[in-house]
Amino acid sequence: MSESIRPQGMERIKNEKLANEFIFKQISEIKAAVGDKHVILALSGGVDSLVVAALLDKAIEEQLTCIHVNTGLMRKNESESVVEHFNKTFKAKLIYIDATDRFLDKLVGVSDPERKRKIIGAEFIEIFAEKARKLKDVSFLAQGTIYPDIVESASVKSHHNVGGLPEDLEFELIEPVRALYKDEVRQVGLALGLPESLVFRQPFPGPGLGVRCTGAITKDRLACVRESDAILREEFAKAGLDKEVWQYFTVVPDIKSTGVKDGKRTDFYPVIIRAVNSLDATEASVWVPDWGILSKITERILNEVEGVNRVLYDMSPKPPATIEWE
C-alpha cells in the first residue's frame, strides 16, 4: 500500500496533523484495494504490527483476522498481554496459537545467529500457513514492515516479517507503514487512539528472546533473559526512564564465569544490560544510567534470577555495534 521505498523528500511525521493525514490516506487505499475481501495479519504484539492492525481495523473491521503465535521466545507475560489488549481494543478477530514446544525443539543445539533467525522464521511461516489454509476467502496478507527493516535486510541481517509462504497461499501484500521510521509509527499509533502503554512498549525483534539468548538456546538461559528483562523494564518504569530511554533489554550470552554464593563457588551466567537512544534505529547512542538505578537493577537481578552471578553494561554505540546482539 505504501511506496516500496521511502519517497524522496517525504516529510517526517512529527505531529498529530501529519499522522492523521497519513492515516486517512492509508485507510482510503486499504479500503479501495481490499473491497469486500479478507486480510490476515501476523500480530507479534510489537508496535509495528499493532499499528498496522489498528489501521486495518479502522478500514475493514471484521474483514481482518490477526494471528498471534506464542513462540516460547516472548518476554514475560507478553502473549497474555497481547491477547488482553487486542480483545479490549479491536473489532477484528484474533487467533492465538501456543507453539512453544515446536520452536524450542527445532532450535536445540543451533548457535549460528542467522540459522536461528531462519529456523524461527521458517517455523513461524509453517504455523501461520497451517492456520491460514483453514481460513476462507483470504486474499491479502498484511505486515508491519517498516523502513529500517528494508535497509537492514539488504546489508546486515534477515528480518522477521512473513515471507516465502507456500505457493498454495498466494496473497497480495499490504504494508501500510513500510515507508516509516519507528518514531513515525509511534506518532501514527497515538493518532489512531492506541494507549501509550502499547505505542511506547519496548521494540521487540521478530525472533524474540532467541537473539538475546546468544548461541544455542537453552531453557535455563532463556529463563534468565526473560526474568532479568522483566526486572529491567519494571525498574525503568518505576524511575520514569521508560519515557527517556528509547530501547533497553538484557542479553544472556552462552558463557559462564566463576562467582560466590552462600560461601560456595558458582559457575553461572552473566546478564548484559543494553540501553540506547535512537531516532530511527539506523544509528544509536548509548544511554548511561545513574549509578543508583543501575545498582538497584543489578542487586535485583543477582538476587532474583536463578543461575546469574554477574551483571555487565554494554557501552557500544551503533555503529559499529548493532542494537541487538545477534
Image (cartoon, helix red, strand yellow):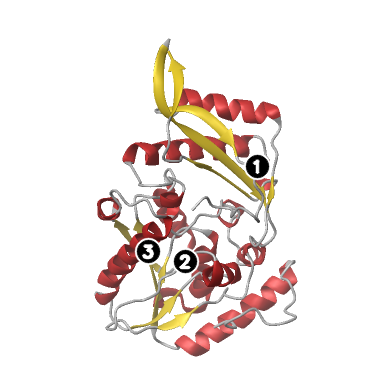
Q: Mark 1: which amino acid?
A: Met
Return the residue at label 3.
118
Compare residues 216 and 303 and report the one nearer the observer.
216
Q: Position of residue 23 (x, y in %)?
A: 62, 75
Q: Mark 2: which amino acid?
A: Ser
Asked which secondary structure carries label 3, the reply is helix
Compare residues 323 and 244 and report the one nearer the observer.
323
Residue at image point 47% right, 66% down: 158
Q: Earlier in the sequence, mark 2 or mark 3?
A: 3
Examine the rendered structure and indicate whether residue 235 appears above or below residue 295.
below
Examine the rendered structure and indicate whether residue 305 appears above or below residue 34.
above
Residue found farthest to the top: 263
Are the two marked residues, 2 and 3, in contact with CB atoms closer than 8 angstroms? yes
Are the two marked residues, 3 and 1, in contact with CB atoms closer than 8 angstroms? no
> Does residue 87 appear left or right of residue 247 in this picture?
left
Q: Earlier in the sequence, mark 1 or mark 2?
A: 2
Asked which secondary structure carries label 2, the reply is loop
Return the residue at label 1.
315
Residue at image point 63% right, 62% down: 186
Real-space Cα separation, disc 2 to disc 3, in angstroms: 8 Å
Return the residue at label 2.
158
Q: Position of residue 319 (x, y in %)?
A: 65, 56
Examine the rendered structure and indicate whether residue 274 appears above or below residue 239.
below
